[in-house]
Image: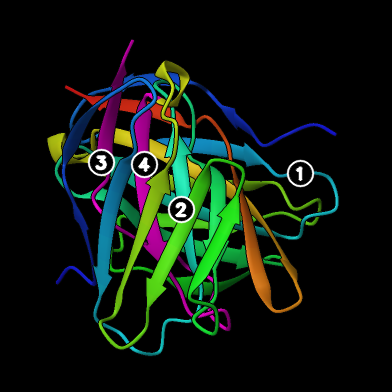
Amino acid sequence: QQQVKQSPQSLIVQKGGISIINCAYENTAFDYFPWYQQFPGKGPALLIAIRPDVSEKKEGRFTISFNKSAKQFSLHIMDSQPGDSATYFCAASRRSQGNLIFGKGTKLSVKP
Amino acid sequence: KAGVTQTPRYLIKTRGQQVTLSCSPISGHRSVSWYQQTPGQGLQFLFEYFSETQRNKGNFPGRFSGRQFSNSRSEMNVSTLELGDSALYLCASTTQVGGVYGYTFGSGTRLTVV
């Protein structure tokens, strides 16, 4: 039973383009939605996170959009760079419990 | 400050054997979580320890166990290894600020079962 569904599985974007990754969740009790970036041979690193009382959060080139009624959230990477090439994971949790439920990941390749 | 240290980085074991993985969290962090990462299932939560007590557990068989020591270092053990246990095992040092958990992952231990 997958509680967080992530799409697409892979994404190829030209340098300077916008990368968009989408996630949908089922459990309305989730109240914390982070995105992680993982490079080969490394563990996931927190990129940006949002709470459901906010519809959008921006940090540099990275933006999370959150739609509570649709139970969906997405990551937008503006002006994508080759150094952004990595696997991105969305996740969800209940802050009171702490364990993260991850999406299956999106492998992003940014072509120069 | 030092990050999360996982040892060893790579392991090759034979079916039926057991294995112990180690994780040293960030200094001052009292909570450690373990995750299994595979290409098919992605990242799955194994368990969480806080102050030497298991606080939360994922949906894994009893062959997977863990513990935490008084210095917050944690170990996980997998007994009677199966081929399907081949995975990257990630440890996360966690801290809670303002009701939100912050996770810092180590680079993982790559376990191969042959």
Does residue B7 belong to the magenta stretch? no
Q: Residue at x 42, y 71 (%)?
A: B57
Does residue A102 belong to the magenta stretch? yes
N-terminal-most mark, 4 or 3: 4
Q: What numbered label is drawn on residue B26?
A: 1
Mark 1 and mark 2: Cα distance apart in space: 21 Å
Q: Secondary structure at mark 1?
A: loop
Residue identifier under label 2: A35
**Marker count (numbered):** 4
Q: Chain of mark 1?
A: B
Q: Nearer the viewer, mark 3 or mark 1?
A: 3
Q: Nearer the viewer, residue B1 or B91?
A: B1
Q: Are marks 4 and 2 in contact (CB under 8 Å)?
A: yes
Within 10 Å of disc 1 (Cα), the crowding (few <14, some 14-19, many 20+) is: many
Image height of B84 relative to A69, above or below: above
Q: Position of residue B35 (x, y in %)?
A: 41, 50
Q: Position of residue A80 (x, y in %)?
A: 41, 29
Q: Are marks 3 and 1 in contact (CB under 8 Å)?
A: no
N-terminal-most mark, 4 or 2: 2
Mark 3 and mark 1: Cα distance apart in space: 28 Å
Same-chain check, marks 2 and 3 = yes
Q: Residue at x 54, y 85 (%)?
A: A53
Q: Are marks 4 and 3 in contact (CB under 8 Å)?
A: yes
Q: Residue at x 74, y 53 (%)?
A: B72
Q: Chain of mark 4?
A: A
Residue identifier under label 3: A106
Q: Looking at the rendering, which quadrant does residue B45 occupy?
A: bottom left
Residues shaded magenta: A85-112
Residue identifier under label 4: A88
Q: Secondary structure at mark 3?
A: strand
Kind of residue indicated by mark 3: Thr
Same-chain check, marks 1 and 2 = no
